[in-house]
Image (cartoon, coloured by chain):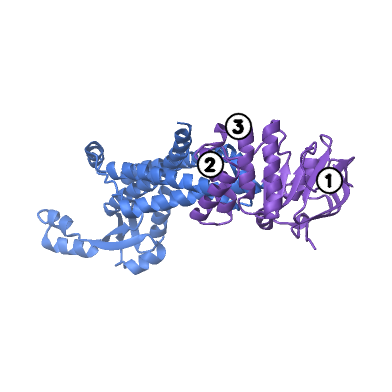
Amino acid sequence: MNSLVVDAKNLCLGYGRDEPIITETNISISSHEFVFITGKSGSGKSTFLKAMYGELLPKKGDLNICGVNVKKINNSKLNLLRRYLGIIFQDYKLIENWTIEKNIMLPLMIGGFSKNVCHAQATKLLRHVKLTHKMGKYPLELSGGEQQRVAIARALAHNPVLILADEPTGNLDEYSSEVIWNLLKNAQAQLGTTVVVVTHHIPATIGINYKHFFIDKGVLYEVP
Amino acid sequence: MKSLKNHLSVILSLFVLFFSVEFSITLHDVIQNQSKKLISNYSIVIVSNKKLTLDNLKLKVKEIDFLKPISPKNILDRLKNDMSSKNLALLQIALPYFYSAKLNSLPSKIRLSDIKKTLMSQKEITKVEVFTKTYQNIFQIFQILQIVTYVFSVIIVVISILLLFKQIRIWILEHEEKIKIMGYFGATYWMKSTFLYKLVFVDSIFSSILVTLIFVFLPNNSYVENKLSNLDILLPQFNILKDGGMLFVSSLIFSMLIVTIVSRKMSRK
């Protein structure tokens, strides 16, 4: 039986003293699953993802990520938890004055791996995302699609348990989007990583079994 | 160019800060030396009916460091031709005891007046001469100079600290995105702040070298040396290893403390 990677119980999320954006949500995501979270703009998709990587603490209820309750988490435990996650952002969030190779090496450097291991893994991942020829380049020298491939390589570098992707194809053309979806599908299929993607719409050509949650009026429903 | 400008603002702030501190220390040493010179040339004259001892006087006035009897021989020698030897012998018996008392520090005008009063309150002491004016003016100039220097140093230190705080804030804001991204992948505080500590480490080296250079070359500069020797002032020698090392360590500890305060404060926001 697959273990639970994400487990939310009566979860309420919101900012400051404002009304909660997500209310009374109960969901669970098992390992190796590919999950889509969809909803209208401003429905709270990204808010839910932020809570999953500990950027936002639950107002009420519990949220367990990889067995850790993020409601009661302190800074050092949060840092440890994040070493098991791979986060992909719509705006890539690559460090501009680092080469793409160094960007990919970031989670490994944080994990305390030796320079040789970091370099070997970065080279392997650059080959995997078909960017070996751009190795010494800086993020701003790359196209949007290429930057997102680097971001995926970075998210995969440390073999995370869970990949969280916030609208990973939001800024990309059709061809680049296709490449990104394939990379994410491969990560789930080949590495067994759980993938949670927040997106406006699920691509018709995705071609895999996936779980789909839809956010409406602050509540997450599983779409059968 | 921008990076150089950023470095300069920290190097200059640290340089000004430690230059003013080192300058105050040097001036303090110079004034201490001058005070010692002044005190070695200064003494109080005490006239007494009875013999005095240093231990007894020290009980009344703790500043008295040395008591030396003044021989009346010179005065009596001058009177030799005008008086008979019998009268001279009588005079010698009748003459009081004269003492020169040296102090261990330069007392203020008020303290000196207290010392005079305390001594005069002793039955056996008939007269005390403290020669206030001869040294008080010089001493007061020293004191004023020292106070003014301290005040200016404190102002400079405060301004430099504020500048350092501001520059480190700017550095953090410039690297905010990078720090955030590192945080998303689980970087600890130290991992996220290493670059700041590296920057201030380099800047501490440069600023302490600058201050050391000035304080090594200044006392050996012929122009400065001439001017100061005319005033009978000798600048203390700056020991590159000991004083320069102390300067570097202080600069490093100080700047790292500021980095820690600012980055901890900003990471809490």
Q: Which amino acid does the dot numbered 3 rest on?
A: Ser
Q: Dot 1 corresponds to which residue? A: A212
Query: Are dots 3 and 1 on a single chain?
Result: yes
Q: How many marks?
A: 3
Nearer-N-terminus badge (1/2): 2
Query: Are dots 1 and 2 on a single chain?
Result: yes
Judging by colour alone, the chain drawn in blue in this rendered image is: B
Q: x%, y% of residue B175?
A: 57, 40
Nearer-N-terminus badge (3/1): 3
Judge depth for marks 1 and 2 and give the one in front.
2
Q: Which amino acid does the dot numbered 1 rest on?
A: His
Measure the alpha-carbon separation of dots 3 and 1.
30 Å
Q: Is residue A88 left or right of residue B154?
A: right
Judge depth for marks 3 and 2 and give the one in front.
2
For mark 3, give the secondary structure.
loop
Kindly identify which numbered label has been placed on residue A132: 2
Colour applied to chain A: purple
Which residue is more in the foreground, A11 or A75?
A11
Tag 3 subunit: A
Residue at image coords 26%, 40%: B228
Tag 2 subunit: A
- Quadrant of the rendered image containing residue A205: top right
Which residue is more in the foreground, B6 or B219?
B6
Q: x%, y% of residue B40?
A: 27, 54
User: Residue B235: in sight, yes or no?
Assistant: yes
Q: Is residue A43 left or right of residue A85?
A: right
Q: Dot 3 corresponds to which residue? A: A143
